[in-house]
Amino acid sequence: MQTSSFASKLNMASPLSHTLLQSSSLVAQGAEARVYKSSLTIGGPPFLLKHRFNKQYRHPSLDASLTRSRVAGEARALLKCLRSGVNVPGVRFVDASEGILGIEWIDGLSVRRLLPGGTEDEEDLDGESIHDPQAKLSAHGISVGNLMSLIGIELAKMHAADIIHGDLTTSNMMLRHLTKFQVPVGSSDSLQLVLIDFGLSYHSALVEDKAVDLYVLERAFASTHPESEPLFASVLQAYADRLGKEWSGVKRRLDDVRLRGRKRSMVG
Amino acid sequence: METYTFNAYPDHLNTAHVALFHNLKNAAALRAQIRAAATSPDEADRDAVNFAFVEPRLITSRLHLQTAIAQASLAAAQGNLRTKTVHSEILWALNPTNNITEALRRYGNSDTSTTLLVVRVGGMDVPAETVLKQMNEVAIGDVQPLDTLEALTDWSSVKKYHKLNNEVAIKTARDVNHEHQIVDNIVVTSVAMKSVVS
C-alpha cells in the first residue's frame, strides 16, 4: 500500500502543488495564469493563489525558466512596494518551480467595478443597484474625487520608489474595506486603495517609463469609463501633489507620449 | 501547544506542532544536548531533540512562523532542502540572508533564552499528546498559549535584521500599531519568497 501510493505520486508532475490547486477554488482565468482562493493551513486565513500554468506552445525548458523568473519578479516587486509604503498585497507562498505565487487576500471591489461603465459585459446582470456605481461608492462612504486621489497618491508612492507597474488599469486597483481589527487605533480611514497584479512590473528611474505607465492608465480609463477626462485629471492632480518636484519632468514627458503613443519612434 | 494541518502537503510533512515555553530553565543544557546529539552514534539521542528551537523574540506573528514552516516543508517535499533537516530549514527560512550559521545563531535558541518556541514537523500519525510529552522532556519551562507571543516580540531587533529602519514604509507609519502591522507584513513576505530572493 505504501509503495503504490508513492508510485502514483511519482507519476504526477508535482504532488504538492497539484493537490494544493485541487483543494482551492477558481476565481478567475487569464491567458497567463489562473487565480484561486486557497488557504495554507486548514482553517487558516485565505490567500490568493496565482498559478502560471504550463504553456504548451513554448519549449518546456524555456517555459520553466520564464515562469520561474516571472514569479520571482512579481514577488520581488511586491516586497519592494511594501518596503516603500505602497499598498500592495503581501506575499504568502512561493513555489517558483511550479509557477505558484500566493498573496494576501484583499477583501473589496476593483476600481473598475466602482466606476461608471466598469460593470458592462461582466456577469453583473442582477439588480438595479449593481448598475449604479454611485450607489456602490456611497455604500463605501467615498466620493469619486476621493477615490481618484487615493489612486494618484498610490501611483506617486510607487513611482517615487522607481517601480513601474507596466499594466495599470482600473481592474488592477482594488478598494479594500479594512475590518475594525485592521484599522490602526485612532485612525478614521478604513478604506485603502491597493494596487495588484505586478506581473509586468519592473524597476526603472526613467521619466519616460513613469510617463508611459500613466499614459497606459489614461487610455484604460478612456476605453472603460465614459467621460473619464475629469476623473483622470484628478488622479494626476493627486499624483503631482504627492510626487513633488519630479512631477514637472513626468508631466512634460507625458505630453510627448500622448502625441506619439506608448511606443517610441525608432526613426530618426 | 497548537497543531497546524497543511493542505496538500505529503503525509509525512502535513502536520506541525508548535509550543511556546515561558520561564525556560535549561537553556544552556538544551544547547549542550543538541550539540552532543549531532555527533552521537545513537539515533535515539538525535530523535530526542528532533525539533526546531526558535527564538520567539524574533517572531512577529503566528503567520510568520507558519509561513516559515510551510516553505521549509515545501523544500523538504521537493528535495530542495538547503540545510540538513526540515527543522533547520525553518530557521534558514526565517533569516533574511543566506548564511546558515547566522540563521542558527539568530533564530535558534541561545544559552540565555528564557522563552522558546519548539516546533515539530511530521505526519498526523503521531498524536499531539505524544509530541507535547517529547517537547516537555527536552524543554523545561511552562507551556503558554501562542497568544502570548505578541508581547515577546523584540521589534527593534526584527527591524534591524530585516534592514527596515530607513524604509519609507516604516518612517511614514501612523503609530506604533500600524508600524507593527507593516513590519509583520514585510517580514512574512520575506520569509514566503526566500526561495526566489537574489
Image (tube, rainbow, N blue to C red):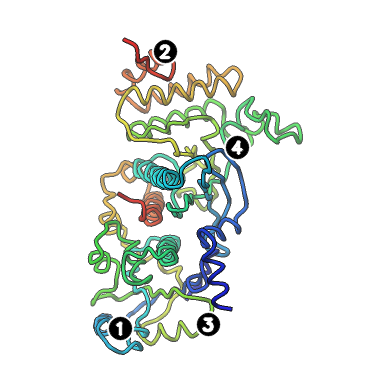
| Pointer 3 chain | B
- Tag in front: 4 or 3: 3
For the residues labelled 4 and 3, the Cα–Cα distance comes to: 48 Å
* Cβ atoms under marks 1 and 3 closer than 8 Å: no
Give above or below for A13 relative to A128. below
> Which amino acid, mark 4?
His
Categorize mark 1 by other alpha carbons within 10 Å: few (<14), some (14-19), many (20+).
some
For the residues labelled 1 and 3, the Cα–Cα distance comes to: 26 Å
Q: Which residue is mark 1?
A: B25
| Pointer 2 chain | A
- Tag in front: 2 or 1: 2
Q: Which residue is mark 4?
A: A140
Residue B115 percent coordinates (x, y): 33, 74
Residue B127 disc label:
3
Name the element at disc 4. Answer: helix
Q: Which residue is mark 2?
A: A260
For the residues labelled 4 and 2, the Cα–Cα distance comes to: 38 Å
Residue B28, by quadrant, is: bottom left
For the residues labelled 2 and 1, the Cα–Cα distance comes to: 72 Å
Categorize mark 3 by other alpha carbons within 10 Å: few (<14), some (14-19), many (20+).
few
- Asked whether A208 or A173 is in front, the reply is A208
Tell me: A130 left or right of A163: right
> Which amino acid, mark 2?
Arg
* Cβ atoms under marks 2 and 3 closer than 8 Å: no
- Asked whether A220 or A7 is in front, the reply is A7
- Name the N-terminal-most of marks 1 and 3: 1
- Tag in front: 2 or 3: 2
Instruction: Establish whether labels 4 and 3 are both on one chain.
Output: no
